[in-house]
Structure formats: structure tokens, C-alpha cells
Image: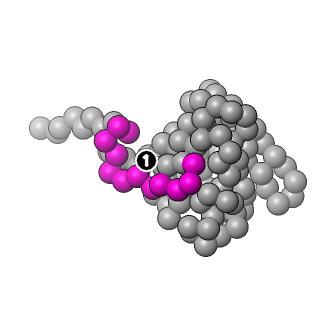
Amino acid sequence: MLDVILRRFDAPDETRRFPRGRFDVVSVGGITLGRATYEPGWKWSEDVGPQVGAERCHVEHVGLVLQGCATAAFADGRVIELRPGTLFHIPAEPHDSWVVGDEPYISLHFLGASSYAR
């Protein structure tokens, strides 16, 4: 008989912490999922980049915004806003990101969680 597995982000397998944010990682059913929680003022190039030795994120992301607003900003000048309810695919093209406004940003990551902020 196969067991049902229930997991919660309240009890993650790993939490990757950085200034003004965290990334909780949970593995279930053979996949790795992530929950990003960023405070107002968080910016990838300032808060995550120095820890991983990069100026921009190179991870491909597929996710869902739950709360707040953030951007994905590419070298060619494109800046995409990510708002609650939006499903997103960010390609593995170098990008920066930052929280917009004074509300915390929370999103779920269905692709890219295993390598994000490492």
C-alpha cells in the first residue's frame, strides 16, 4: 500500500536565509517546491547575489504570487511586475528582482526551488 504524504512550509526541509528574506524548501512526491518570503526593500542583487557570488539570478522559475508585488528585471530593460494570483515563468536569462511597495511579497516556486539562493 502506498502512503499519502502531507507536508507544510511551516516545517520545511531547508530554509535559505538572506537579508530581508527567506526561501523555504520542501520536497514531496519527488519534486522540490519553494516558498519565497521577501520584506519591503528586498532586492535580489543586494540581498541574495552577494551570498551566491552573482550580480543577477540565473535560475529558471515557475511560480505563483500569493501576496505583495515584485519585479523581474532583465538586462534588455524589460521590467515585469508580479502581482497576487499571477502564475509566472521567468526564463534562466540573468535577471534582478525587487519588492515593490511596502507589503511583504510571498510566492510559491514549482520549478527552480532546488537551486535558488544556493
- Residue 96 image point, x, y percent: 72, 56
Compared to residue 14, the image places residue 5 above or below, namely above
Q: Is residue 95 left or right of residue 116?
A: right
Q: Which residues are magenta?
A: 9-20
Helix, strand, or loop for circle 1? strand
Q: Is residue 68 left or right of residue 21?
A: right
- Residue 91 image point, x, y percent: 68, 54
Residue furthest to the top in view is: 85
Residue furthest to the bottom in view is: 53
Compared to residue 64, the image places residue 43 above or below, namely below
Few, some or many residues within 10 Å of mark 1 (<14, 14–19, 20+): many
User: Who's the residue at 67% across and 59% down the image?
Assistant: 46
Looking at the image, how many numbered discs can be counted on the residues?
1
Q: In this figure, which residue is indicated by the disc labeled 1?
A: 24
User: Who's the residue at 34% across and 46% down the image?
Assistant: 12
Query: Label 1 sits on what residue type?
Result: Asp
Q: What colouring style does the render use? A: one colour
User: Who's the residue at 78% across and 42% down the image?
Assistant: 80
